[in-house]
Image (cartoon, rainbow, N blue to C red):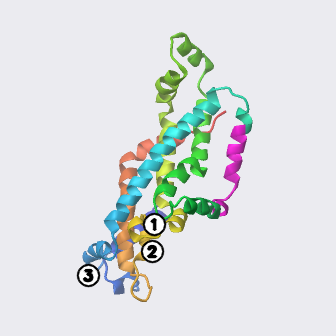
Amino acid sequence: MVVPFVFPFVWMMGSSLKPAIEVFAYPPTLLPINWQWGNYARVFELQPFAQQYFNSVYIAVVVTAGTLFFSSLAGYAFARIGFIGRGLLFLMLLSALMMPEEVTIIPKFNVVQSLRLDNTHWPLLIFPVFGAHGVIATFMMRQHFLGIPQELEEAAFLDGLSRWGIFWRIAMPIATPVLSAVAIITFLTTWNSFLEPLVYLRSVEQFTLPLALRGFTDEFGQPIWEVQLAATTLSVLPILIFYVFAQRFVVESFASSGVKG
């Protein structure tokens, strides 16, 4: 497991500090002979990389928070509140997952363009929360809330709690593992999203990191590999640091958020 996962990452970090001629040298080396720390400075000289970094961070955070809020409310409603057409509505919601993202991207772009929201971050904030990712999160939350014993809710009603009080003070605290799983999946998916930013964004200042990484090219359109590797290393660091510090919590959240009901 170490070779296929760790070796490419170590090679990427080492090559981000090499001159261009050493990146594809044979035999390959992990560490540079001539250390080029200036590769990291060029990342910020060739593009507004700090702004693009901020764009990715705040979009991932907002989408994750929005998905947690709306999917927990919707999941609880589908699991614990009886209303006419609940099963049919949930089935229609799930059927939307069967349609590939690539099929709906053009109609969504037409809607965005008609609302004059193209080249803004609004489509990247709204569509993930209320689109396919939001449906998957709602499904996971519903399956978790189905496991709450009916007797627990009845006891809470007798104690005078309202429906909102039961949701907020009883259901949400015991949903921490599945909320963690939803947050991790949503954050990683949003952080790595490429197609949607490619369709909706035009300005370099509005780009997110996946779009920015393809922009480190010379005047002939050829990749500047050592700079691209430096930028890629910087883009991976938040995910790596997060996983190192939260590794045990991440594993536990996935293990305890199995589908039930």
x, y percent for residue 66? 48, 44
Label 2 belongs to which residue? 214
Q: Is 46 or 226 nearer to us in this picture?
A: 46
Q: Nearer the viewer, mark 3 or mark 2?
A: 2
Q: Do we see residue 99 in this rendering?
A: yes
The magenta segment is 89-104
x, y percent for residue 217? 41, 81
Q: Amino acid at mark 3?
A: Asn
x, y percent for residue 218? 39, 85
Q: Which mark is residue 34?
A: 3
> Are dots 3 and 2 in contact, CB under 8 Å?
no
Q: Is residue 189 magenta?
A: no
Label 1 belongs to which residue? 210
228 is higher (above) or lower (below) than 160: below
> Are dots 1 and 2 in contact, CB under 8 Å?
yes
Please tell me how crowded label 2 is: few (under 14), some (14-19), or many (20+) other residues with Cα within 10 Å. Answer: few
